[in-house]
Image (cartoon, rainbow, N blue to C red):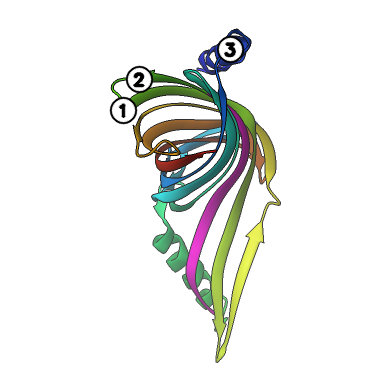
Amino acid sequence: MKKTALSLLAAGVIAFPALSSAAEVPYFGVSAGVGLVHNSDAESGNFEYKDILEYEKGYALEAALGRKAGMYRGEVAIGYSTNDADKFFDKDMNDIEDAVQETLESWGLEENISDMDITVSVLSVMANGYADFELSRFLTAYLMGGLGYAYVDAELSFTVTDGTEKLEMEYSDNGKNAFAWQLGTGIGLKVTDWLDVDLGYRYFATDDVEIADAKIEYSSSRVMLGMRYNF
């Protein structure tokens, strides 16, 4: 898959000089959608763990600045996505919260634990290449690929109540930088000469990131709705 992404992006870069006679149109785009993170496997020392994290649906946002030349586009995009964990080591987060609460009570402590969550967020900077295929005067289909870097952060949060005092606690692993890549496809609709809307699918993945002394896999499927303003 990485070789495919590299080949697609390289093809777009090589094609741009050949299109120097075509008028280049700068654009700005924004998109938002649903992020579905695939179950994460992990390695720690000589141990391998399958589906260590399972996730709930989250959201993804992106803003991009680029240029269009003929049927090709190139852009730099900043994206952000976040997802809460649904299960950790095949245990529901509510069950883990209950187990922690029972442990505190067995120690004779009066604190109450609630709202326990593991949140994984990703901030990315990507160089994306697109190939647009005209289906009609107003409708296009596209293929895209991108390469870049991502900052992946995992955070454990919960609320501790002691009598009348309520404290919100957060623990983060300070995040990790990782190589990132993506592939996607979609359709675009020309609304006016200066405005396009599109609906697309993207597969986004990073190299394994080391969190709490374990190497964690990260990949997601994203369905994005976007608008592109052509200057």
Q: Is residue 212 above or below residue 219?
A: below
User: Which of disc 2 and disc 1 is earlier in sequence?
Assistant: 2
Q: Residue furthest top?
A: 18
Residue 41 % position (x, y): 50, 35
- The reply to whether dot 1 and dot 2 touch (C-beta < 8 Å) is yes
User: Which of disc 1 and disc 3 is earlier in sequence?
Assistant: 3
Is the residue marked by circle 3 packed among few (<14), some (14-19), or many (20+) residues within 10 Å?
few
* 3 or 1: mark nearer the eye: 3
The answer to if 114 sits in the magenta stretch is yes
Q: Quadrant of residue 141?
A: top left
Query: What amino acid type is highlighted by mark number 3?
Result: Ser
Query: What amino acid type is highlighted by mark number 1?
Result: Leu
122 or 168: nearer the viewer = 122
Residue 198 % position (x, y): 38, 36
Q: In the image, which residues are magenta?
A: 112-129
Residue 204 % position (x, y): 50, 32
Q: According to the image, label 3 marks what residue? A: 21
Query: What amino acid type is highlighted by mark number 2?
Result: Glu
* Label 1 residue SS: strand
Q: Quadrant of the C terminus?
A: top right
User: Which of disc 3 and disc 2 is earlier in sequence?
Assistant: 3
* 2 or 3: mark nearer the eye: 3
* Label disc, if present, on residue 134 of the rendered structure: 2
Q: According to the image, label 1 marks what residue? A: 139
* Cα distance between the residues tagged 2 and 3: 19 Å
The answer to if 208 sits in the magenta stretch is no
- Magenta part mainly helix, strand or loop? strand
22 or 227: nearer the viewer = 22
Q: Residue furthest left?
A: 136
* Label 3 residue SS: loop
Is 62 on the left or on the right of 55, as rendered?
right
